[in-house]
Amino acid sequence: MSQTQPFTFFRRFRRASTRMKAALALLLSLCTGGVGLQAQGPSGGAVRAGSAQISGEGTSLTEITQQSNRAVIDWRSFGIGAADQVVFIQPSAQSATLNRVTGDQVSLILGRLDAMARCCSSTRTGSSSGAAPR
């Protein structure tokens, strides 16, 4: 095996479609016993800055009602299953929420994420979205 072959794989992977990347992530997860990849509602939410309430955590409908213009929320896991929905209710179009995922699971977004303003996420393990995230 030449030294350039592994690099060729990564170049091709970088250009692969989102669907292909999601399929590979799912395959790798199944091969490792499901560690690190679950498409379920967000869980383990803790507001670290600003003012917000989380309801329906870990269910098919999670609502985050934000009272302050800016908020930071730490999540143990943040995935959205294909039939699930996460709604951010924010005070204005200038509001922003930073979602920091601190757990070891990959964030798999297959369902619906609604926000009136900006909603950003930061993960240690990466994230992937399905063919048609809404």
Image (cartoon, rainbow, N blue to C red):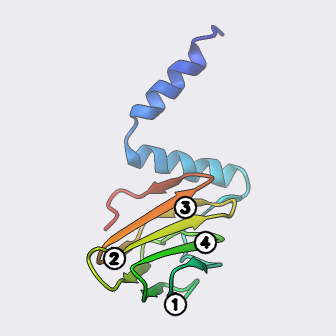
Residue at (30%, 73%) from the top-left corner? Answer: 117
Q: Which mark is residue 107?
A: 3
Residue at (37%, 41%) from the top-left corner? Answer: 17
- The mark closer to the camera, 3 or 4, is 4
Q: Earlier in the sequence, mark 1 or mark 2?
A: 1
Q: Is residue 60 above or below residue 134?
A: below
Amino acid type of the residue tagged 1 in the rendering? Gln
Q: Earlier in the sequence, mark 2 or mark 4?
A: 4
Q: Which mark is residue 53?
A: 1
Q: Is residue 27 above or below residue 96?
A: above
Q: Earlier in the sequence, mark 3 or mark 4?
A: 4
Image coordinates for residue 5, horizontal then vertical, percent: 57, 15
**Disc 3 and disc 2 in contact, CB within 8 angstroms:** no
Q: Earlier in the sequence, mark 3 or mark 2?
A: 3
Asked whether 81 or 122 is in front, the reply is: 122
What is the distance, in whole Å, between disc 1 and disc 3 at their CAs? 21 Å
Mark 4 residue crowding within 10 angstroms, few (<14) / some (14–19) / many (20+): many
Query: Looking at this rendering, what residue extends furthest in the top direction?
Result: 2
Residue located beneath label 2 in the image:
114
SS of the residue under disc 4: strand
Residue 112 placement, left or right of 71: left
Amino acid type of the residue tagged 3 in the rendering? Ser
Amino acid type of the residue tagged 2 in the rendering? Asp
SS of the residue under disc 1: strand
Image coordinates for residue 19, horizontal then vertical, percent: 40, 49
Q: Earlier in the sequence, mark 1 or mark 3?
A: 1
What is the distance, in whole Å, between disc 3 and disc 2 at their CAs? 16 Å
Mark 1 residue crowding within 10 angstroms, few (<14) / some (14–19) / many (20+): few
Residue located beneath label 4 in the image:
74
Image coordinates for residue 89, horizontal then vertical, percent: 36, 85
